[in-house]
Amino acid sequence: MKTEASMGLRALAIAVMSGIILLVPLTGIALADPASPSPASDPAESSIITIGDSVMLGARWVLEKDGIEVVDAVKNRQAAAGSGLLKKRGPNLPMNVVVHLGTNGIFTADDCRAMIAAAGPTRRVFFLTLAVPRPWEAKNNTVIRNCVSANPGRAFVIDWNASVAQHPKWVYSDGTHLRPVGAKGYSRMIEQAVAAAS
């Protein structure tokens, strides 16, 4: 037969053990090192930098609001300028580089390879296909897709051309430049592509 004292000790032991069990997770939360983010929240993994032309310039306000840094997006930029812009940033480039060039003229395989090389071996480079009703659109998009296929794990396609075909109201009547709703879709596509590759 259990004495009152032994039953009291047993109840105290259970209470103490319960207290310890409750304290462990609380202590773990309080003592977590804020300087050591988990891989999923590592800013270096998810940080994005972009270079582009007037199409990207039209989305700048949304990109910046969404936390995407726009290095340089200006009117009439040619694809050949891309590698030089990346070289200027050198080791300060983040993990993810997004390129939207080729709207204003020819995008060559050499341009593509030079941008991947300038980004460096540890970075991912995302190329948006083009939605521009000009003679060079199809050829440039083929070059982009072929270049990405030749650089698996380092280069990725964001199929902007297909998105504009599905959402024609995303662009103005020129078939190229972004309406506000298109700018939002543009930014969302970039974020989703980077997240999928991370």
Image (spheres, helix red, strand yellow):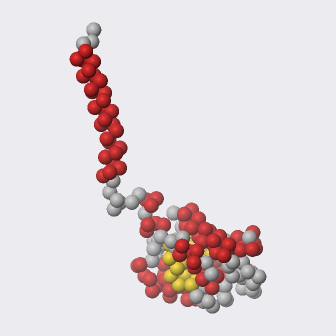
At x 46% / y 59%, what residue is drawn?
Answer: 40
Where's residue 18, x and y in %?
A: 33, 33
At x 43% / y 68%, what residue is drawn?
Answer: 44
Q: Within the image, what quadrant is residue 179 found in?
A: bottom right
Where's residue 131, x and y in %?
A: 71, 79
Q: Give the residue at the far bottom of this rendering.
A: 76
Question: From the viewer's perspective, is 115 left or right of 182?
Answer: left
Q: Within the image, what quadrant is residue 3 found in?
A: top left
Q: Nearer the viewer, residue 147 or 162?
A: 162
Q: Give the residue at the far top of this rendering.
A: 1
Q: Within the image, what quadrant is residue 90 found in?
A: bottom left
Question: From the viewer's perspective, is 44 left or right of 22?
Answer: right
Q: Quadrant of the N terminus?
A: top left
Question: From the viewer's perspective, is 32 left or right of 112?
Answer: left
Q: Is residue 110 visible?
A: no
At x 73% / y 80%, what residue is drawn?
Answer: 172
Where's residue 84, x and y in %?
A: 50, 88
At x 50% / y 76%, what residue is drawn?
Answer: 69
**As drawn, 55 above or below 22:** below
**As drawn, 170 above or below 19:** below
Q: Disc count in the image? A: 0
Q: Is residue 24 visible?
A: yes
Q: Nearer the viewer, residue 9 or 173?
A: 9
Where's residue 15, x and y in %?
A: 30, 29
